Amino acid sequence: MKAVVYEGPRKVTVKAMPDAKIERPTDVLVKITSTNICGSDLHMYEGRTSMETGRILGHENLGVVIEVGSAVVRVKVGDRVCMPFNIGCGFCKNCERGLTGFCLTANPGMAGAAYGFANMGPYSGGQAELLRVPFGDFNCLRLPPDAEEKENDYVLLSDIFPTGWHATVLAGVQPGDSIAIYGAGPVGLMAALSAQIQGASKIMVVDTHRDRLQLAEKLGAIPIDDSDGNSAQRIVEMTGGEGADRGCECVGYQCTCHGREVPNLTMNNLVKAVRPTGGIGVVGVFVPEDPGAQDELAKKGQLAFDFGQLWMKGQHIATGQANVKAYNRKLRDLIAAGKARPSQIISHTLPLGQAPDAYQQFDARNEGWTKVVLKPAG
Ligand code: NAD
Ligand code: ZN
């Protein structure tokens, strides 16, 4: 099969790899028809993780079931399915509670497994013609009859739509709340869409990329260009001097200021921008060590965080990988009912062969490159 393989910092190739196959009776084999490039792939692409060379990338996957293992009872050949980026077993203590981003058995020794991901187990990614889905009955979300027509909406159920939603849940969004979202990348834009659906009264999205801020505005948010570094102050002013009720971090440890990485910037801006007793949800990725960082603390996975401010303001903070399965079925039904159209942020739909160029353009955050969907089946 053809697949996108990580060859080292800023190098991916599309090449022939051994076909994915059923390895356990509970596996499902999927012929991939859509697979996205994610901001999380970029941390790996840039060599800022411990991703091994030679591995297949891709954790945002949708396709058609072509084979099922002997112990699979519900998923059938021919089903169109979308897989959460997390692999959950369904029976461990965390999966049972819906915390499938922290499955205790799929990646022994660590809580959490994913396809084609650094530190998240040995599983191959789906930027390929075929994908092996472990615990298939649990991990395949079956799609309704309009699956082909709305494929670019449904494929966003694999990660960024549920992750944006998770950011708002971690922050504690309630109808009528104001919310400040740092990052207008795909995840931040999906957090804005999620806040909109949940009845937020004012949604403010911060970034420095004009094209992405325009998309935020299209989703009903107030765009805030942070080129001057005053975003937090402006959010406080826009909320009657109090600060936003909720804040979401949708950037992660590689957040920047004028092209230089400042790993604590968004976290400290959120503490400033959110009101006393407000909530902050952090889905942008932070890592336990980052040897490639310029910052001494960040090398050790630490941040110069304004904890004293956070404490004085009595804010709460929650973090982590999104438990995609906790949301994907409900969000699927919103798409099916025509009440959510997340695909409006997709900028490029390309054949798998164009992945190397797409990685380069998306990594550079070149104008107009917001979200790429690869189509391995042509
Ligand atoms: P992205 O890199 O395309 O988007 C990040 C955006 O943040 C960019 O538009 C960038 O201009 C902006 N940004 C950079 N510095 C900033 C700053 N100081 N202030 C405001 N905005 C700033 O990626 P994405 O796909 O949107 O992903 C965002 C983050 O979410 C990444 O860290 C990714 O790994 C993470 N992620 C987490 C989960 C999860 O389950 N928790 C899932 C998917 C992605
Ligand atoms: Zn992703």
Image (cartoon, rainbow, N blue to C red):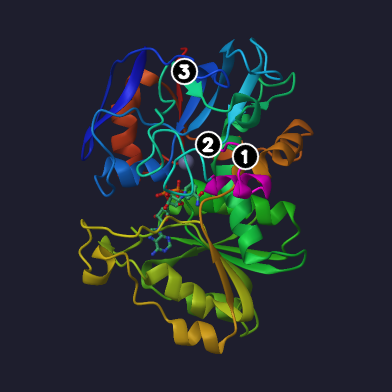
Q: Amino acid at mark 1?
A: Pro
Residue 8: x and y in percent read 20, 36
Residue 215 seen in this snapshot = no
Front tag of 3 and 2: 3
Looking at the rendered structure, the secondary structure element under dot 1 is helix
Residue 376 magenta:
no
Q: Residue furthest bottom?
A: 312
Mark 1, residues whose alpha carbon is within 10 Å: few (<14), some, or many (≥20)? Answer: many
- Numbered tag placed on residue 87 in the rendering: 2
Secondary structure state at the residue bearing disc 2: loop
Q: Amino acid at mark 3?
A: Glu
Of tags 1 and 3, the one toward the viewer is: 3
User: Is 110 left or right of 26, judged from the image as shown?
Assistant: left
Q: What residue would you read off at disc 3?
A: 23
Marks 1 and 3 sit apart, C-alpha to C-alpha, by 34 Å
Quarter of the rendering containing residue 226: bottom left
